[in-house]
Image (cartoon, rainbow, N blue to C red):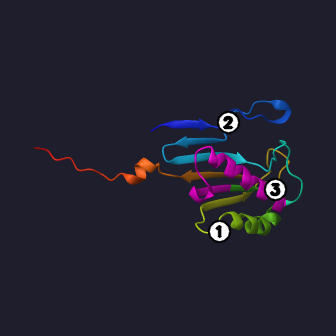
Amino acid sequence: MSVEFLGGTRTGTGGQPLPLSPAVKAGPFVFVSGQVPKGDNGEIVPGGIEAQTRQTLKNIEKALALAGCSLKDVVKSTVWLDDAHDFSTFNRVYAEFFPENKPARSTTQAKLMIDAKVEIEVIAYKLSALARGSSPRRVRQA
């Protein structure tokens, strides 16, 4: 099984390199590191849980795209909310991004490492075109 580390080096506060990969592809699985609501400028987007959930899920879409995946390929998500009172609003926005096949999910309240209201990580599963088209072959012995 091959393993690919995707997304290059990311930087944190003060330009410090972060010791993580945004996504790692291992066989048919893609593991996306916890994403937070950072906009394109590297700053946490302003607004409440609704705006921050939307941005976080957009960031997950970008990380999944590095491995040729989309939200439709997500089979598991883990969510950390800064405030349990945000749960219903978070759920409403999250449901917009997963309208059909809903991944398994764990959600907990936790003090996040940065000043954000939400962090989400996901696991996706996507077979390659070759693997999808192949079928087991029987080998006959003479």
Q: Residues within 10 Å of mark 2 (few under 14, many from 20)?
A: some
As displayed, is residue 6 above or below residue 107?
above
Which is more N-terminal, label 1 or label 2?
2
Residue under the point 66% across and 46% down: 63
Quarter occupied by residue 95: bottom right
In the image, is residue 98 above or below residue 112?
Answer: below
Left or right: 25 with respect to 93? left
Query: As shown in the figure, which amino acid type bears the numbered disc 2?
Result: Leu
* Residue 78 appearing in the image: yes
Is residue 111 magenta-colored? no
Give the label, 2 or 1, closer to the camera: 1
Alpha-carbon span between mark 1 and mark 3? 19 Å
Q: Nearer the viewer, residue 83 or 125?
A: 125
Q: Position of residue 40 (x, y in %)?
A: 81, 44
Q: Main secondary structure of the magenta part?
A: helix
Mark number for residue 75? none
Q: Secondary structure at mark 3?
A: helix
> Residue at label 2?
20
- Per the model, the C-alpha gap separating discs 2 and 1 is 30 Å
Say which residue label 1 marks. 99
Q: What's the residue at 62%, 57% (across, down)?
A: 71
Residue that label 3 marks: 52
Crowd rating for badge 1 (residues with CA inside 10 Å; few <14, some 14–19, many 20+): few
Quadrant for the N terminus, please.
top left
Q: How many marks?
A: 3
**Residue interval drawn in magenta:** 49-78
> Is residue 46 or residue 69 the one in the foreground?
69
Look at label 3 and name its amino acid. Gln
Q: Residue at x 60, y 65 (%)?
A: 102
Q: Nearer the viewer, mark 1 or mark 3?
A: 1
* Amino acid type of the residue that numbered disc 1 sits on in the rendered structure: Pro
Location of residue 30 in the rendering, given as x and y in whole percent from the top left corner: 57, 47
